[in-house]
Image: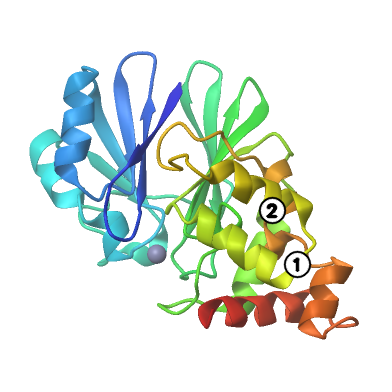
Amino acid sequence: MKIHQIYTKSFMRNWNYIFELSNSDAIVIDPLDDVLINEFVDKNSLNLKTIINTHEHFDHIQGNQALIDQYGCDVWSHKNCIDKVPGLSRILEEGEIIELDTACKIKVLETPGHTFSHLSLLVISHDLQEAVIAGDALFNAGVGNCRNGGDPETLYQTISKQFCILDDSVVVYPGHEYLENNLKFTLSVEPDNIDAAEWLNDLKGTDPTSNFRPITIGDERKINTFMRLDSISLRSNLGMLDASDKDIFIALRERRDNW
Ligand SMILES: [Zn+2]
């Protein structure tokens, strides 16, 4: 199975993803612009069979109806998305494993916090964790906000218990492209984070929406301050040396909201 990452050029900098199976069937994740998805499907002679929505926000479901009308796709999403996601035809359950292709399956992760209807998809290839479609839970060098139906404490539990435990080699595919801003935020609270500074420097003169290098969970552990809650530099900059990880995370989320 191939994972295609498609930049939507929307003002919110959304990423869409297409899983291309070996029999040319395709699954689209969070379609925003049906025209863009159509172009890709046509160009690659794919049969679009399924839509998966990571959550119910409009910019993750906007393309559903047009694609259903055209292809008659199934729509898979979280149980709390009934009446919110157009065409929902299958509820995905936490921990469910779905065989997609030869030696390739996805494991459904229930990842609340950005909203309470949020799923992520762990892609497992030849029994190895390969990638995670993280929606708006985990971004490259950041995490989703909690302002539209979410909760920071719940997001902390999700990041620490669902994402921090993934293998270092897992590629992170988020719902939005916010890398540069997020690296700058990391450096605002960890000015001595050499890795974040190097990544920011490498970004100069490049386009993060095309051909930028894959970012793994191992990278996130170095550049994503929301996954670095035990950093002494971070804690001292927040003036919270002895606080719990949860309180550090919530303080960071609040600071990012007002940054
Ligand atoms: Zn969202």
Is 137 or 213 nearer to us in this picture?
Answer: 213
Question: Quick one: which residue is furthest to the bottom in this view?
Answer: 239
Using residue 241 as the reference point, say whether residue 186 is left or right of it: left
Query: Pointer 1: what residue?
Result: 190
On screen, 116 above or below 136?
Answer: below
Residue 7 position in % (x across, y down): 33, 42
- Residue 145 in view, yes or no: yes
Q: Where the N terminus falls, by quadrant?
A: top left
Residue denoted by label 2? 196
Q: Are marks 2 and 1 in contact (CB under 8 Å)?
A: yes
Comparing 38 with 70, the one in front is 38
- Type of colouring: rainbow
Left or right: where does residue 20 sit relative to residue 116?
A: left
User: Which residue is nearer to you in this view: 98 or 134?
Assistant: 134
- Compared with 153, 205 (above or below) is above
Rendering coords of residue 104 (x, y %): 53, 23
